[in-house]
C-alpha cells in the first residue's frame, strides 16, 4: 500500500482526517417548517462524525477494500476451509432475474423453475453422497451438524429409546462437532486416534453401548487422512444401535469417488461454500445442507422440495417427523443456485476431477517439502497435508511465525495449531484450482522460510514486514482491548 | 525447575499445602502449562465458597492460542481467588509458581494429594510428552 499520508494511507482513520466545517454533501433547503427538538436523553448533541469530502470517503474505503486478501487475489491454502476458486459463472446464474427477483412468499406456480432447480440440487447431492434424503435449508456447516444431531435424537426417541445420551467424537474432530452435539443435549465422549491417525477401534468398542446415540466423524479426518478403519467404525457404532454422523467439511477429497452412504454413514452435512465453490470466508453466506439415509428422511428439517405425482409440479413439503424449520424459507437460495451451477458446469467427470486434483496437489506439496518440514502422520494424504513446525521450533521459529512470514511472500497463511493433536501444526489445503506454477512458488517460499530460520531467524520471528500492519501484539489486544476511537 | 514443595496433576496444575493445621493450600498452573498455552489473556475461575472435586473441571484459561479447561488439583472449598489475574493474566505466564497463583483452597481430604505427582515424577511425565 502507499504510505506517506495521502488518502490511500489507511492507517489514518476517517475521524483523523476530519477538518472542521468540511462537508461531503450539500442538502437542499428544507421545505418543511423546523420542529423543536424533543428533550430526549437519547438525542446526543455531541455526536462525533467525520467532516470529510466525498472523494476522501470514496478513496479511503476503496483503499481499504484493496487490502483484501481473497481467492481472487492470492493463493489461499487455509487448511480445512477449501478456499477454491469460485467460478464467476456461478454468480452470473444467481443474478438471473428468474432467480434473483423472486420472493419466497410468491405462489408456488410462479416459482416452479426455482423449485425445480432446488429439487434437482437435492437429487444431485443425494447422488453424490449416496444419502438420498436431502434438505437444503441449513445455512452453514455447524448449522447442518446441529440439524443432524437433532435428527439423531429424534430418531432414537421415536423408537422409545431415550437412554442414548452420549455421542462419540474423535480427538481430531472440528471444534464445532462437540459444540453441536452438546447443543442438541448430548454428552460428548472423546475417542482417541491411533498412531496412524485413525479412530482407535478398541477405544470406540469400549464405549459403544446402549447409551451411545452415535458418532460424529470427519472423513477424511482433519489430519487430511482417510480413516482406513472407517467400515469398522460404522459397524461398531451400528452394532451398538447408534448412528454415524459425517462432517462433510472435507468432501473435496471424495467427490465423485466415495459415497458416504455406501460406507455406512446415516447422516451428513455438506459445506456448499467449501466443496461446491460458493463464496465464503467473509464473502458468504454459507449453506450446509443435510443428507440422510432413506430411514432418516422423514426427520429432515422443513422444507424439502417435492415433485408431485410424477408430474412437473414442484412444491415445498414438511417431512412426516420433521425436526422443524432451521431457517426462514428455503435457506440461502442464492448460494444454492451457485452450487447447482457448479455441479451442472462440471458434470460427472468434472466432479471426479475435483477430488483427483485436490488430492494430487496436496500430495505434491507433501512430497516437495518432506525434507524440510516434519510430517507427523506420514501417509499418503487426501486433500490437505498437515505438517509440524517442530524442526523449525527447535531452531527458535514457531509455526505461527512461519505462517506470518508466508504473508510477506504473498500467500495466505495455512491453518495453524489445528488439529490439536499435532504439535505446531501447519495445515495446508491447496485445493484443485491452483496451477503447478503457483504450487511451486508456495513450495519455494516454504523452503526459503526454512532457510531463513537458520540464517536470519529474527526476520521470520518479526514477520510480516510487507503488510499494511505488521506483527500485532495479540496478547495485549486481548488483555487490554482498545475498542473505541477517542478524540485526542 | 518445578519446586518440590508441592504436588502436580497430569493436567499441569500444582497444589501446595501452606499450613498443615488449617488444611489450606494454594493452587496454580505449571511453567510447562503456561509455555504450552502461550500468552494467557483470561481466566475463568470458581468463586469463593465454591466447592471443588479433585480432577474435575474447575474453570477455564484462555490464551491467544486456545481455551483450555482447568482441573481441580484437590477437593475442597475455595477460600480466596487471585484477584490480580483479572487485570493481569500475564502473571500466570511470568510467575506461575508464585505471583500467578490461582486459588486458595480449604482441603476436604488432604490425603488426596498422595495421588498426585511429585516434582520429580512430574518432570519425567512432561519430558515424555511432546
Image (cartoon, rainbow, N blue to C red):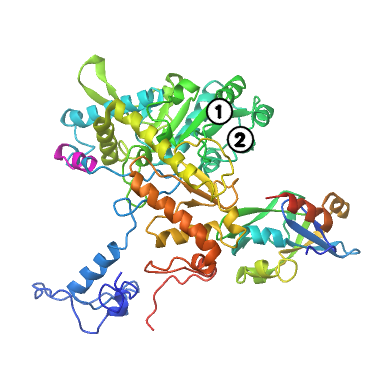
Q: Which contiguous range is marked in magenta? A: A90-98
For the residues labelled 2 and 1, say whether their Cβ atoms are less than 8 Å apart: yes
Q: Quadrant of residue A288?
A: top left
Q: Residue at x 59, y 27 (%)?
A: A162
Q: Earlier in the sequence, mark 2 or mark 1?
A: 2
In the image, A151 versus A261, the foreground residue is A261
Residue A161 visible at all = no
Residue A291 visible at all = yes
Q: Quadrant of residue A339?
A: top left
Quadrant holding the C terminus of chain A: bottom left
Which numbered marker is on residue A228? 1
In magenta stretch: residue A256: no
Relative to B25, residue A21 above or below: below
Q: Position of residue A232 (x, y in %)?
A: 59, 23
Subunit that carries the residue with mark 2: A
Q: Position of residue B117 (x, y in %)?
A: 82, 53
Say which element carries label 2.
Answer: loop
Q: Which residue is mark 2?
A: A196
Say which element carries label 1.
Answer: loop
In magenta stretch: residue A92: yes
Q: Residues within 10 Å of mark 1 (few under 14, many from 20)?
A: few
Q: Residues within 10 Å of mark 2 (few under 14, many from 20)?
A: some
Relative to A47, residue A243 above or below: above
Seen in the image, is A439 located left or right of residue B61? Answer: left
Q: Position of residue A420 (x, y in %)?
A: 58, 47
Seen in the image, is B3 located left or right of residue B85? Answer: right
Subunit that carries the residue with mark 1: A
Q: Position of residue A475 (x, y in %)?
A: 54, 67
Magenta segment main secondary structure: helix
Q: Quadrant of residue A57?
A: bottom left
Residues at marks 2 and 1, common chain? yes
Amino acid at each position: 500500500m502507499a504510505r506517506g499520508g495521502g488518502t490511500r494511507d489507511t492507517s489514518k482513520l476517517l475521524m483523523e482526517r476530519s477538518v472542521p466545517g468540511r462537508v461531503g454533501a450539500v442538502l437542499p433547503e428544507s421545505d418543511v417548517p423546523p420542529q423543536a427538538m424533543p428533550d430526549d436523553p437519547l438525542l446526543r448533541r455531541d455526536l462525533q462524525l467525520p467532516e470529510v469530502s466525498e472523494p476522501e470517503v470514496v478513496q479511503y474505503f476503496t483503499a481499504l477494500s484493496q487490502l483484501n486478501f481473497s481467492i481472487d487475489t492470492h493463493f489461499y491454502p487455509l487448511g480445512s476451509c477449501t478456499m477454491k476458486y469460485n467460478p464467476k459463472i456461478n454468480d452470473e446464474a444467481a443474478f438471473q432475474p428468474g432467480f434473483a427477483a423472486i420472493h419466497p412468499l410468491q405462489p408456488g406456480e410462479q416459482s416452479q423453475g426455482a423449485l425445480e432447480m432446488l429439487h434437482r440440487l437435492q437429487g444431485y447431492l443425494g447422488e453424490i453422497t449416496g444419502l438420498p434424503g436431502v434438505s437444503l435449508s441449513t445455512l452453514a456447516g455447524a448449522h447442518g451438524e446441529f440439524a443432524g444431531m437433532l435428527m439423531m435424537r429424534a430418531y432414537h426417541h421415536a423408537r422409545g429409546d431415550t437412554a442414548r445420551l452420549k455421542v462419540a467424537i474423535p480427538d481430531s474432530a472440528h471444534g464445532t462437532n462437540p459444540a453441536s452435539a452438546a447443543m442438541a443435549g448430548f454428552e460428548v465422549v472423546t475417542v482417541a486416534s491411533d498412531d496412524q491417525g485413525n479412530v482407535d477401534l478398541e477405544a470406540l468398542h469400549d464405549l459403544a453401548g446402549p447409551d451411545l446415540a452415535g458418532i460424529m466423524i470427519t472423513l477424511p479426518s482433519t489430519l487430511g487422512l482417510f480413516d482406513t478403519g472407517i467400515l469398522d467404525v460404522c459397524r461398531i457404532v451400528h452394532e451398538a444401535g447408534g448412528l454415524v454422523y459425517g462432517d462433510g467439511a472435507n468432501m473435496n477429497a471424495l467427490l465423485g469417488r466415495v459415497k458416504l452412504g455406501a460406507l455406512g454413514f446415516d447422516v451428513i452435512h455438506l459445506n456448499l461454500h467449501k466443496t461446491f465453490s460458493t463464496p465464503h470466508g467473509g464473502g458468504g453466506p454459507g449453506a450446509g445442507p443435510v443428507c440422510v439415509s432413506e430411514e432418516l428422511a422423514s426427520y429432515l428439517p422443513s422444507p424439502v422440495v417435492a415433485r408431485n405425482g410424477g408430474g412437473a409440479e414442484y412444491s415445498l413439503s414438511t417431512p412426516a417427523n420433521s425436526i422443524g424449520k432451521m431457517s426462514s424459507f428455503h435457506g440461502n437460495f442464492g448460494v444454492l443456485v451457485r452450487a447447482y451451477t457448479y455441479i451442472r458446469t462440471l458434470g460427472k467427470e468434472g466432479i471426479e476431477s475435483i477430488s483427483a486434483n485436490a488430492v494430487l496437489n496436496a500430495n505434491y506439496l507433501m512430497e516437495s517439502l518432506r525434507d524440510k518440514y516434519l510430517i507427523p502422520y506420514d501417509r499418503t494424504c487426501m486433500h490437505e497435508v498437515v505438517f509440524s513446525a517442530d524442526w523449525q521450533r527447535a531452531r527458535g521459529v514457531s509455526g505461527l511465525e512461519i505462517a506470518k512470514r508466508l504473508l510477506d511472500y504473498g500467500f495466505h497463511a495455512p491453518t495453524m495449531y489445528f488439529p490439536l493433536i499435532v504439535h505446531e501444526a501447519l495445515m495446508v489445503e491447496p485445493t484443485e484450482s491452483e496451477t503447478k506454477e503457483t504450487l511451486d512458488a508456495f513450495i519455494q517460499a516454504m523452503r526459503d522460510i526454512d532457510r531463513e530460520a537458520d540464517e536470519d531467524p529474527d526476520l521470520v520471528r518479526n514477520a510480516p514486514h510487507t503488510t499494511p500492519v505488521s506483527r500485532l501484539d495479540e496478547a495485549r489486544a486481548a488483555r487490554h482491548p482498545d475498542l473505541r476511537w477517542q478524540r485526542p | 525447575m518445578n519446586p518440590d514443595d508441592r504436588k502436580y496433576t497430569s493436567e499441569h496444575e500444582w497444589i501446595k499445602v501452606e499450613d498443615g493445621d488449617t488444611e489450606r493450600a494454594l493452587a496454580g498452573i505449571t511453567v510447562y502449562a503456561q509455555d504450552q498455552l502461550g500468552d494467557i489473556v483470561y481466566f475463568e475461575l470458581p468463586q469463593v465458597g465454591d466447592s471443588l472435586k479433585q480432577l474435575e473441571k474447575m474453570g477455564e484459561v484462555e490464551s491467544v492460542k486456545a481455551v483450555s479447561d482447568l482441573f481441580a488439583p484437590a477437593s475442597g472449598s475455595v477460600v480466596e481467588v487471585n484477584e490480580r489475574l483479572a487485570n493481569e493474566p500475564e502473571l500466570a505466564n511470568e510467575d506461575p509458581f508464585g505471583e500467578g497463583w490461582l486459588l486458595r483452597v480449604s482441603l476436604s481430604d488432604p490425603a488426596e494429594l498422595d495421588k498426585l505427582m511429585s516434582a520429580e515424577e512430574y518432570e519425567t511425565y512432561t519430558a515424555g510428552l511432546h
